[in-house]
Amino acid sequence: MPTRINPWSLVLVVILAYWLFTLFGSSNTRSNISYTDFLTYVEQGKVARVILQEGRINGFFKAPERVRVGNSTETTDRFTVIALPSGYTDPQFTQLLRQNGVVIENRPPSIWPQLLYTLVPILVLIGFWWFFFMRAQGGAGQVMQFGQSRARLYGKEKRVNTTFKDVAGHTEAKRELMEVVDFLKNPQKYIAIGAEIPKGVLLVGPPGTGKTLLTRAVAGEAGVPFFSVSASEFMEMFVGVGASRVRTLFEEARRNAPAIIFIDELDSIGRKRGAGIGGGHDEREQTLNQILSEMDGFEKDSSVIVLAATNRPDILDPALLRPGRFDRQVVIGLPTLEERKEILQVHMRGKKFGPDVDIEALARLTPQFSGADLKNLVNEAALQAARENASEITQAHFQAALDKIMLGLERGTLKLSEQEKRAVAYHEAGHAIAGEVLPYADKTEKVSIVPRGMALGVRWSRPEERILMSKEHLEDSLAMTLAGRAAEELFVGTITTGAAGDFKQATALAKQMVLDWGMGDHFKNVAWGSNTGPIFLGEEIAKKQDHSEETSRLIDADIRAILDRAYERAKEVLAAHAEAVHKLAAELLEREVVQGERVREILAQTQAPEAIAPTALQPEG
């Protein structure tokens, strides 16, 4: 494959060659003689003509003369004297030449050597920065288009082939977006009745739920040009470039109307203006201002719709969300049980599966999984089967993949002492037995004392599909979470640092119960806000406390009371089922992994008393 030659490299080579030629080229055609020999030849009348030029004398003999050059001699009809005394233009020197019949010619100094000495370093420096500038902008063509849009266009030559058939689940969202397709296909139907075509549709939802996929499906269904760009691509180190790129993007979309502009990760450019401590980012705010101006400046029949996606709608500038810009917000939530089954079936296409693969069971084991998580689960199962050289993917491969995703990699090199293994076994047995006995807690799927990820052991529950969480479920969940430390205290004889993660999880849940859900003893109809979400610089940091010190003390008392009741309840449950805890811990020490069905068998074999009701320990009064 031929290599492309950079024209600037050729220019530099030519300049360098000419410079070298002017410096050293004359030494190949003239003999350099000393000044003393030159004066001798003049006095002998052998010199016919000289050319006086700054820095040297070029002379011509009347006839070829044998001259001494260094340690050798040669015959030549011309010579050069380079090392000249400072007074070679003295009148006596000129008189000597005239007395001996030498023709004198004066030439001004050449400007080229001086220019080359000055310009070559500058040209080399310019060429160096030019090269890196082109590399940074993706080629020479991009240098002259620094402020042009970086959006990728999918049009007649490169169409989007994704349709709504390729998107599983999200029935309501697809129904809403089908109207956008109709706007693009039949805009005159809406214009004729006086309706304005929506200018923007904002897709909101957690990462991996399929916001970008749905947008591609809209473009594929509508069959119109589709401009796709990430919001971060508008940003540059030079102020004004982002705004210029926004202008060119919208101008190109108008020329190709009807069209769709898709801006992914809108929150990176659309954050609230003036919210940063110490001032905002000028380039980001100018770019946002240009987006606001372009969206609000559409004509009614422009047929250009802006689709955008974000998982942080809470930090977007209010001007973006008002009607006239993003007229609609479509929530793309986590898939339900039925939607997870559909998504799994989509990602299983073209793969070989064993007859034991149960899609229903996999969907039930993966609550809170997004579409991307489910795709990753199917891929991890396929990789597991390939590692084992299996001819098809089985349920065991899915289980191994699920363990890897949910629990982390096994840490086989981590060796625990017998005392540590015993403490971990009782800790996890306490979680499992409490989870099975407490009526509103999620039931056990698997218990393991094999170190995985950052955990030395794990009790994996089988969560149920819930939209609302009751107070009874939350209290049972807290008791189950704290049952690990309770088991250590009751059966190991000491407590360890293994409950650190349990305490963080339980404390965060108790805070939400009091501050957000009104489940405290003193605050049943007030939401103070737990601020457990990510901090948006400039708001939460600078937010002043909106309640008194006495209220803070009562909030702390409520949180502590909820946690103390849950811990005492866990101890009571485990003390009542001590035989089951001992037996499960022994099996864990022997087998390391115990399935949920076996945990329930152990409870049945030990003839455990009835589960303690969640109202057994209620605050007095």
Image (spheres, rainbow, N blue to C red):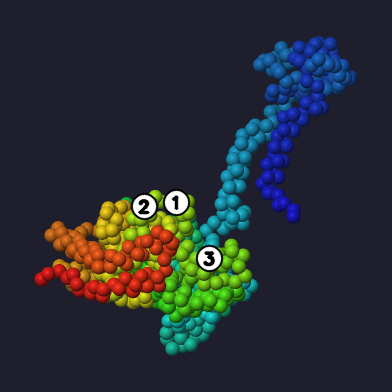
Point 44% across, 67% down: residue: 207
- Residue 417 visible within the image: yes
Write down the quadrant of residue 99 in the picture.
Answer: top right
Q: Is residue 406 left or right of residue 487?
A: right
Q: Amino acid at mark 2?
A: Glu
Q: Nearer the viewer, residue 181 or 342?
A: 342
Give the alpha-carbon distance from disc 1 to disc 3, as whole Å: 24 Å
Of badges 1 and 2, the one in the foreground is: 2
Q: Which mark is residue 414?
A: 1
Of the numbered discs 1 and 3, the one sitting upstream in the chain is: 3
Of the numbered discs 2 and 3, the one sitting upstream in the chain is: 3
Q: Nearer the viewer, residue 231 or 242?
A: 231
Percent position of residue 619, x then y: 15, 69
Q: Is residue 274 left or right of residue 72?
A: left
Q: Nearer the viewer, residue 48 or 271?
A: 271
Q: Nearer the viewer, residue 334 or 605?
A: 605
- Residue 327 visible within the image: no
Write down the quadrant of residue 516 in the picture.
Answer: bottom left
Contact flag, marks 1 and 2 (Cβ < 8 Å)? no
